[in-house]
């Protein structure tokens, strides 16, 4: 019978902006002296919110947890297209934003609900002939990317203050929210990029359950299990 320690489980982090998901993993691993730490679903540096960390033997659940659906809230900035499709990139085109109504925006959103195909951005970790696309993009190389099928369960408008549009969504794994923002801008004829993004859910885990990285790092190692969900409890929450 396998014996689990209090450090085998899931730690939910509210990721700060400007940190990569790998940065958070490396910091937690080094700070607490853990041998095995992984994350389940990458968040871009500009994004904040729920990052699911797996510790110890729970790293075996990483692939399964990564496949969970995700929830987000974010802001689309219309009229400006960037080379990364988000606020971390450089503006490559600027167009005037037409006097869009809420009905116009709702109609555009409707086109992106359900099954859709997305072309992954060049600035992504997807590999082409063994090399991450973002490394090719840094050299000014662009390659053909195969569109991928993803599913948008829900996409709703929550506030409009043109040129900014705030939204809420839930989607399948592998969905590029910044690509969705760029595609919506293209559909509206003015271009757009993702200016803010916050992950609010990943499978059964909610942002409200997470602690900030600052709070976690201030926690004594002996007390950290108070915030770690035991591996057996995690297993019960996972989809069959």
Image (cartoon, rainbow, N blue to C red):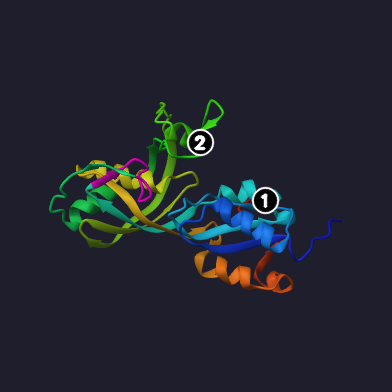
Kindly identify which numbered label has been placed on residue 126.
2
Rendered-image quadrant of the N terminus: bottom right
CA gap, disc 2 and disc 1 = 22 Å
Q: Residue furthest right?
A: 1
**How dense is the environment of label 2, judged by Cα within 10 Å: few (below 14), some, or many (20 and up)?**
some
122 is within the stretch colored magenta: no
Residue 5 image offset from top left, x and y in percent:
79, 63
Figure label count: 2
- What range of the chain is rendered magenta? 80-89
Q: Is the magenta stretch mostly helix, strand or loop?
A: loop
Where does residue 49 sit, x and y in percent of width and height?
48, 61
Q: Residues within 10 Å of mark 1 (few under 14, many from 20)?
A: some
x 42%, y 57%: residue: 72
Number of the label disc, if any, that sits on residue 61: 1
Q: Is residue 136 left or right of residue 116?
A: right
Q: Position of residue 149 (x, y in %)?
A: 44, 37
In the displayed structure image, the side of residue 50 where residue 168 appears, left or right? left
Residue shown at the point (50%, 65%) measured from the top left: 207
Residue lying at the far front in this picture: please name it. Answer: 139
Q: In this view, does 151 lie to the left or right of 65?
A: left
Q: Is residue 216 shown left or right of residue 170?
A: right
> Circle 1 — which element?
helix
Q: Sequence order check: which comes first, mark 2 or mark 1? A: 1
Q: Can residue 236 be seen in this view?
A: no
The vertical placement of 225 against 59, above or below, is: below
x then y, percent, for residue 150: 44, 41
Foreground pick, 151 / 66 = 66
Does residue 94 show up? yes
**10 up-or-down from 107: above or below:** below
86 part of magenta stretch: yes
Residue nearer the viewer, 98 or 201:
98
């Amino acid at each position: 019978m396998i014996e689990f320690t209090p450090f085998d489980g899931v730690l939910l982090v509210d990721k700060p902006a400007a940190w990569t998901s790998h940065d958070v993993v490396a910091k937690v691993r080094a700070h607490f002296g853990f041998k095995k730490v992984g994350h389940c679903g990458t968040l871009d540096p500009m994004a904040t919110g729920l990052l699911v960390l797996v510790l110890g033997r729970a790293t075996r659940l990483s692939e399964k947890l990564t496949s969970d659906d995700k929830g987000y809230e974010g802001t689309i900035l219309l009229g400006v297209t960037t080379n990364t499709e988000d606020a971390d990139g450089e503006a490559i085109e600027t167009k005037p934003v037409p006097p869009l109504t809420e009905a116009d925006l709702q109609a555009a959103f409707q086109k992106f609900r359900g099954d859709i195909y997305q072309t992954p951005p060049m600035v992504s970790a997807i590999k082409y002939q063994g090399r991450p696309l973002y490394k090719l993009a840094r050299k000014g190389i662009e390659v053909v990317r195969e569109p991928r099928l993803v599913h948008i369960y829900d996409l709703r408008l929550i506030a409009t203050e043109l040129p900014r549009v705030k939204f809420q969504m839930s989607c399948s794994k592998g969905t590029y929210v910044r690509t969705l923002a760029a595609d919506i801008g293209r559909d509206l004829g003015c271009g757009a990029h993702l200016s803010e993004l916050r992950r609010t859910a990943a499978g059964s885990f909610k942002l409200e359950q997470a602690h900030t990285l600052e709070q976690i790092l201030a926690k004594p190692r002996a007390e950290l299990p108070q915030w770690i969900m035991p591996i057996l409890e995690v297993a019960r929450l996972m989809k069959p």
